[in-house]
Image: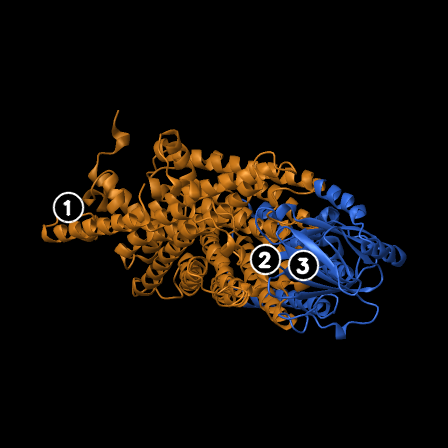
Chain colours: A orange, B blue
Amino acid sequence: MIGPVPGVAVALGALLVLAAYYRFRADSPPTSYADGGIVTPKIGLTTTEKPSGLLRWLTTVDHKDIGLLYILFGTAAALWGATDGMMMRTELLVADTTVWNVETYNAVFTTHGLTMLFFFVTPVFTGIANYMLPLLLDADDLSFPRINAIAFWLLPPSLLMVRGGLITDVVGTVVGLLPLEIAALTALEPVAMGWTMYTPLSVEMTNPQIDVTLLGLHLSGIATTMAAINFIVTIFTERPDDLGWDELDIFSWNMLVTSGIILLAFPLLGSTIILLLLDRNFGTAFFAIEGGGPMLWQHLFWFFGHPEVYILVLPAFGLISFMLPKFCGRRLFGFRFIVYSTIAIGVMSFGVWAHHMFATGMDPRLRASFMAVSLAIAIPSAIKEFNWIATMWNGRLRLTAPLICVIGAMSTFVVGGITGVFLAAVPVDLVLHDTHYVVGHFHLIVVGIIPLAMFAASYYWFPILTGRMYNRRLARVQATLLVVGAFVTFVPLLVLGYLGMPRRYGVYPAEFVPLNQVASIGAFILGVSLVLWLVNMIQSARVGTIVDDADVWNLKETDQFTREWQWFEKRLAERRSERPDPDEEP
Amino acid sequence: MGRARRGAIVAAVLIPAVLATVPATALASSATDQLISRLNRQLLYIAVPIAVLVEAILIYTIWRFRDNDDPKPTRENRQLEITWTVATALVLLFVGTASFHVLADPAVSTISDSPHGEPEPGEVPEDAVEVNVTAEQWAFTADYPNEGVTTNETMVLPANRTVYMYVTSEDVIHSVHVPDLGLKQDAVPGETNLVRTELSETGEYRLYCAELCGAGHPEMLSSIRVVDESEYDAWLDDQRSGSDGSTSNESTASNES
């Protein structure tokens, strides 16, 4: 049993050892180049310079490798968060707690939210941008490859910290079989304060895991901010001279605005979390009733929290605007207006936060002004939808899996967006706030347009990432299933909200059972769709058809063979000249 | 023109189908509910057709231009952009104006003058019912200061009289959520918030806590029974004489349902 003081000593010793190691390393000549990309900046040959095996992935600073790591990490987090989601929908099949108890249910929806928001959506989009931005900008790498690697490697420990309660539970159970007693492991329980962490509840809860989770969130915020700074600098400085702002692709534009929002919003979350940690552990009174008051937490949290919503969704908008024209055979309609609308969303996203607090008893004059901005932000969102439809109009639509995903995203966005307008209207929000309506509304976005944009990207760029083609029929089935599943799951929740069922209820009145069961069936459809995607990705990456022609999507004929595909074509040609053609073998 | 007509037909078929799924609100149960339900209906009358129309156009576009032999290059159209921006703005302007009118009504927007202090009864009309609603983990307590009655069972309120509820919390944030009466007010410790309404339909209405407040959150249920004047007086007398066993059975029964 290690007491608190020896624990500090152990940490100090570990740091000293680490310092000594680096001191030693600094003296010895470098034996291997972890970073092949810097030795030979010529993209496409970098793989031959990298160390092989696990060491390559641990030491890489190549944007493509880090991009893949981000995507794999985000996918793993998504599967973990989806498991939480499935657990919730299983519990809600019945009105009382037959599957899990209320504490478990509360923990599961808390970690579901934290995992999905901080460790699934943003890492996956960061990964896609990591891989694609330098290619789209014709840059060698991101501006700060090492910061890029640090930003990624901070994420796995922060995820483990946020989800620590469950891990220590499992470890504790395993260790408990041995004749050992480790109190620290059993003291940590999965956090159950809701992802919004409202004070005073989050201050009063005694579970020490909450502190670990808060530190993990703080760490993930640092990682996210570093990645955002990297993107901003890259987009500003790494563009070639002939690539002006008017020529910049729409995905880079969206990543630029997203990164700007991150830069302004995430540091605030970090500071707010520190205040909460101080309140919990050092007796400060930032959010105490006799101090700053519980409302201060909500203001600070949502000042981060609402921009966060757009941090999640703007990259998805960007991907859709980017991919849609490729499958319509014509350029994006209203490029300039889509860029303006993105910037407008970025600016306005900082002026809507109090619409999460309409029921707290705020001054009605304040409520009215936040209602005005919250309604106004629907305009740029609608502009995007209209421009997408106009892009399709008069085009030649090819209903491939990426386009099915994009269209599905557009259709869920209509319902997800319009239901949001109801919540912006203060009086209606007063009835619907904190009911399942809210859950249905935002899940139509976060299980609609966001994963659909990711799936579309995964299919669209699959040849670049793996050199192989995915199973097209399975992909079409998967995409359709996801759209159907999203509507079947979340439209019943909208109705449940109208009937008054509050959210975060593991036990609920019996009259809500049928609609909840429909929603759970929908959730299981979503789960099946997710598994199909996973099978397709893994199996196709292993044994899919090898791509020989870089123009997988016939983009040349419509003059949309963009830079990342040109890079891919060049790499295929280089590979071909290096190795004998596999087709020539008998 | 033909396209527009087809779109309209699709919309005409789909709108009633979608409207049917929207729960129809029956007679208003309170002044607040009446205002909010009417606003909600107005918004639905705009939102559902717009949603159906956009989805229909989307589906029609896919159907019409799928593998189209004669694609046309994209040509920018500033007028179209301005048109749909202004159109969206006008719709939202209507939503904002309609919501603002409802928001400005005293049955919807109620702030007490001193949220941190005691409510000031001087402003309250003579015949109004005043109730202090205090939430704590995990129950609601209703205190009728003018009647000398306190209950943590079903809250009984008279119909057709103005009700003033002063909502506060003892520990963490809770929320008084009575969906069928159109009422919601967070119960914030250290603050007293006012809910003002007039109840019109007698009956029993479920009262939920709608803000996560710990392990007992989903079982923090109670109810509000709206009765006529004489029954209300009888209930008050009953409470004053100290027999609060009569209401406890009902509230626990509703909890277990």
Q: Is residue A567 above or below residue B183?
A: above
In the image, taking residue B68 as reference, residue A28 lies left or right, namely left
Residue that mark 2 sits on: B171
Residue type marked 3? Thr
Position of residue A490 measured from the top left corner of the image (x, y, whole percent)? 61, 45
- Determine whether the residue tagged by mark 1 lies in a helix, strand or loop: loop
Where is residue B244 drawn, in percent x and y?
78, 49
Q: Which residue is mark 3?
A: B134
Q: CA distance from mark 3 to mark 2?
A: 10 Å
Q: Cβ–Cβ below 8 Å for labels 3 and 2?
A: no
- The subunit letter for the residue under badge 2 reads B
Left or right of A230 on screen, residue A399: right
Residue underneath mark 1 = A32
Q: In the depicted view, which residue is nearer to us: A510 or A209? A: A209
Q: Is residue B57 left or right of residue A282?
A: right
Distance from label 3 to label 1 (Cα)? 68 Å
Q: Look at label 2 and name its amino acid.
A: Asp
- Report whether residue A209 is seen: yes
